[in-house]
Amino acid sequence: MKLPLIPSRRISIAPMMDWSDRHCRLFHRHISRHTWLYTEMVTTGAILHGDVGRHLDFNQEEHPVALQLGGSEPADLAIAAKRGQEWGYDEINLNCGCPSERVQKGAFGACLMAEPALVADCVKAMRDVVDIDVTVKHRIGINDVDSYGFVRDFVGEIADAGCRTFVVHARNAILKGLSPKENREVPPLKYAYAYQLKKDFPTLEIIINGGIKTLEEIDQHLLHVDGVMLGREAYHNPYILSSFDSRYYGDQNPSKTREEVVLAMLPYISQQLEKYGDSGKGLKLNSVTRHMLGLTFGLIGARAFRQTLSDTKKLAIGNPSLLLEALLKVKDANHGASI
């Protein structure tokens, strides 16, 4: 099967605060060559007034990678989007789904769903200054507004502003009374809303997100929508990504084994510690290895792997060879078999 010239968002990994940083994304890229990756949400204020490099730097190996922005001022979003394109990102994504009160105070995130005209203005402002895709990630409703018509009208108005790709987290966002964690678990999933969006807007790219954990579930969703975005499952069980290249992108080149992933990460970790470990920027061994704790999920010895990489005394020494020690415990538990 010939792969498309433009990488597909058929499978993607969600933007997750405190999780999907550049170290995590590079780790995921070593497991899957094609899965589309997203940054944590970066606010327009951080880009306009903060350390741009700290917020936008990424590893070139991460491509395809999207920058998710948080903001609600069209002019500010336009500047931030342009900088994102100049930095080399493949997509700009607008966050209209985060329900945290901190984000609400900035008048963006899920509360923007109540102002589709403003979101349309934001999308148009960004599209006017960049050549890459501008996409929107959103919920299906806010608070007790849960009719399909609400999200249909929201998508319709934003599509009129030129947005062609929508990532649909198929739950409502409860803006008061639930924590961000509870907002990822308590509101019921309504996948049928995302399916209906694809039927009502067949020319749009509709990507579904929320509570998806298995390859079988991904297969089922792809019968109805264009793409699937995984969140927490990709973080806690990252080796699930190893199936994606062949299963969803037609790439028959073998994926790295878990051991090969670890060996591929070691030079990067050493380089990062050398560059940033003593610079006052706070990079420690755990800054990278914490994202790798789930690599041996489901294997005999997985607990020993996690415990070794969670040993605070050994982490404090800062020697990347701790990963080899953890890996050896898993290999021993599996009688030396390839993992």
Image: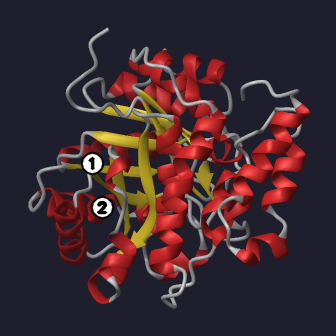
Residue type at numbered disc 1: Glu
Q: Within the image, what quadrant is residue 101 found in? A: bottom right
Position of 203 relative to 158 (above/below): above
User: Counting other residues with Cα less than 10 Å from the Cα at mark 1, is it few (<14), some (14-19), or many (20 or more)?
Assistant: some
150 vs 194, nearest the viewer: 194
Describe the element under mark 2 as helix, strand or loop. Answer: helix
Q: Is mark 2 in CB contact (under 8 Å) with mark 1? A: yes
Position of 281 relative to 10 (above/below): below
Where does residue 287 sit, x and y in percent of width and height?
A: 62, 69
Residue 119's tag is 2
Horizontal relation, residue 243 to residue 121: left or right:
right
Disc 1 target residue:
157
Describe the element under mark 1 as helix, strand or loop. Answer: helix
User: Which quadrant would the C terminus be assigned to in this image?
Assistant: top right
Q: Disc 2 vs disc 1: which is toward the camera?
A: 2
Give the total of numbered labels: 2
Residue at the image point whose x is 25% and y is 39% from the top: 164
Residue placed furthest toward the top: 1
User: Which quadrant would the N terminus be assigned to in this image?
Assistant: top left
Residue at the image point whose x is 55% and y is 30% from the top: 256
Residue type at numbered disc 2: Val
Position of 255 relative to 127 (above/below): above
Residue at the image point whose x is 59% and y is 67% from the top: 18
Horizontal relation, residue 188 to residue 130: left or right:
right
Q: CA distance from mark 2 to mark 1?
A: 9 Å
Position of 219 relative to 173 (above/below): above
69 vs 1, nearest the viewer: 1
